[in-house]
């Protein structure tokens, strides 16, 4: 029998792999990387824009990933930086009109993917799943910041 750690790890990795494959297939239509769909989704919720630091936090990405994505998306005309003065460090990153169009596409396709992925899952099971997943994430966050106890 597969132990809990192996099953959990394998299932999470499979979800991650399939998510990346679907995202890559969808974003390829725009000549973009699959991971960029997260940026479109998050930025679409903040019309006034976000700083790079905020985007890092909300997308769970590091500064280097966000910096590369912002540079690429800005060159392609999907986002713009709005500054108050000359300080680009705290510039707000906003979607352009074309960026909003792609974000709407991403949201529509993501909703379809989530709906299809949850086929056969009852609303009650879905609520339990998300509640359980949230508890696991919080526990893992605590463990990662405090470390595993020496003797358990």
Image (cartoon, grey):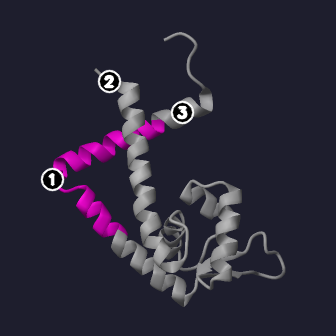
Tell me what residue is drawn at x 40 percent, y 28 percent: 6
Q: Which residue is mark 3?
A: 142
For label 2, the residue is: 2
Marks 3 and 2, the one that precedes in the sequence = 2
The image quarter containing residue 114 is bottom left
The residue sitting at the top extreme is: 151
Residue in the foreground of this view, choosing between 23 and 95: 23
Nearer the observer: mark 3 or 2; the answer is 2
Which residue occupies the extreme right position in the image? 86
Instruction: Choose the circle earlier in sequence order: 1 or 2.
Output: 2
Q: Left or right: 94 with respect to 26? A: right
| Residue 55 position (above or below residue 44) | above
The mark found on residue 120 in the picture is 1
Element type where label 3 sits in the image: helix
Q: Is residue 22 left or right of residue 141?
A: left
Say which of 101 and 11 sits in front: 11
From the top left corner, tell me how far across and down residue 70 is, in percent.
66, 71
The vertical placement of 54 against 138, above or below, is below
Q: CA distance from mark 3 to mark 1?
A: 33 Å
Question: What residue appears at the point 47 percent right and 65 percent down from the top-left corner?
Answer: 24
* Residue toward you, 4 or 34: 34
Instruction: Say which of marks 1 and 2 sits in front.
Output: 2
Locate residue 2, reporting x and y percent.
Answer: 32, 24
Viewer-nearest of discs 3 and 1? 1
- Residue range corresponding to the magenta coloring: 110-138
What percent of the width, then of the height, locates residue 64?
71, 58
Q: Are marks 3 and 1 in contact (CB under 8 Å)?
A: no
Residue density around tag 2, few if under 14, some if 14–19, many if 20 or more, within 10 Å: few
- Residue 146 lies within the magenta run: no
Verify whether residue 131 appears in magenta.
Answer: yes
């Amino acid at each position: 029998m597969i132990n809990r750690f192996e099953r959990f790890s394998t299932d999470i990795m499979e979800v991650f792999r399939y998510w990346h494959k679907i995202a890559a297939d969808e974003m390829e239509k725009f000549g973009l990387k699959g991971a960029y769909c997260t940026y479109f989704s998050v930025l679409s919720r903040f019309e006034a824009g976000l700083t790079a630091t905020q985007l890092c936090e909300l997308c769970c990405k590091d500064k280097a990933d966000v910096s590369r994505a912002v540079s690429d998306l800005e060159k392609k005309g999907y986002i713009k930086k709005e500054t108050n003065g000359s300080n680009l460090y705290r510039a707000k990153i906003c979607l352009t009109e074309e960026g909003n169009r792609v974000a709407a596409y991403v949201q529509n396709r993501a909703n379809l993917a989530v709906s299809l992925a949850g086929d056969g899952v009852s609303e009650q099971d879905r609520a339990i799943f998300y509640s359980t997943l949230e508890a696991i994430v919080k526990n893992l966050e605590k463990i990662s910041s405090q470390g595993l106890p020496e003797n358990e």
